[in-house]
Image (spheres, helix red, strand yellow):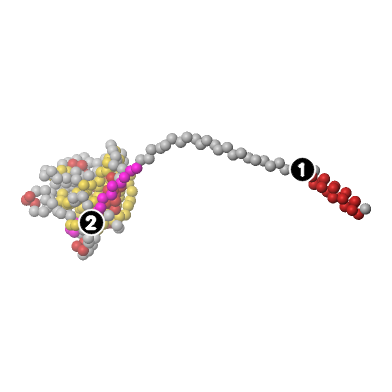
Amino acid sequence: MFFIVIGIFSTGCMQLSNTGPVTPVITATIVPMVGATIAPQQVVTIIHQVSQVKDVKDSELLFSLQVPVEWNVSTHRLENPENFVGFMYQTDLVGNNKFFIQSYINYEERDQNYRDDCRRWSPAPIVTNVTINGIIFDRFESTANGTTNVTYVARKTSTNERGYLSVLAFSANTSSRFEKEDYDKVVSSFRYYPKEDISTMPGEEIPRISLYEHEGGNAHSVVVSSSSGFSGSRSSAGSSSGRSSSGGCGCGG
């Protein structure tokens, strides 16, 4: 009797377990999507040719800077404007007044003449204040007709030990991708030195040239009057001599 009961109970359990719900197995088939066609884009590689640099200095004007090794830098004296007392010099970095430095005694607030002339540019320049190696400059920038004109005018509080202030000015072609950047880099290397230190500073001495043989080292330029100040200075000897020693701003707008 015992074995009959056990047999009946086992049969019922097997039947219950076989009649339970069955969970279906779902098989997913992944169909790869066809990606959208992307047109190839042209990649333009711009190569920036970087020149080696050299240190140059003017021991009389107490400044130095770094320029590309292929540049031939020279300084000449400018003719004094009317009623101006002191000396004015122009250091040509790139010929034809493309990039130069004017150094001058700040007689009767002459630095303000440079600023006033820059503000007459058209279009009106963007004016910023920058400090380069301890020298405070007002920086003027204006672009017109494919040329970007930039002038740095040192403030009178940055006069060097011999009483000179400096104006650095250049004209950069907008079609040349890196020209303005490269010129600004040259400006960023400009610095003054104390009188007792300049002789020991590294760098080639910038030659002082004479535009006339009889001057014996004091070069003068012929100044042609111009309503914009800088743009009218020329040399009868054919050398670039500055846009004007009348206190203009360098790059005409």
Q: Is 252 or 4 nearer to us in this picture?
A: 4
Q: Secondary structure at mark 2?
A: strand
Region of the chain picked out in magenta, as a range: 45-63
**Residue 170 painted magenta:** no
Residue kind at label 2, given as amino acid type = Asp
Residue kind at label 1, given as amino acid type = Pro
Quadrant in which residue 20 is drawn: top right
Residue at point 22%, 41% (across, down): 228
Q: Report the disc number at residue 159.
A: none
Q: Is 109 or 28 nearer to us in this picture?
A: 28
In the image, taking residue 84 as reference, residue 51 lies left or right, namely right
Principal secondary structure, stretch drawn in magenta: loop
Quadrant in which residue 133 is drawn: bottom left
Residue 104 seen from this side: yes
Q: Secondary structure at mark 1?
A: loop
Q: Report the disc number at residue 55.
A: 2
Quadrant in which residue 39 is drawn: top left
Q: Residue 71: horizontal and vertical position, in percent?
A: 20, 50
Q: Is 30 or 125 nearer to us in this picture?
A: 30
Circle 1 residue: 21
Q: How many marks?
A: 2
- The 10 Å Cα crowd at callout 1, few under 14, some 14 to 19, many 20 or more, is few
- Point out the image quarter for the C terminus: top left
Residue 107 seen from this side: no
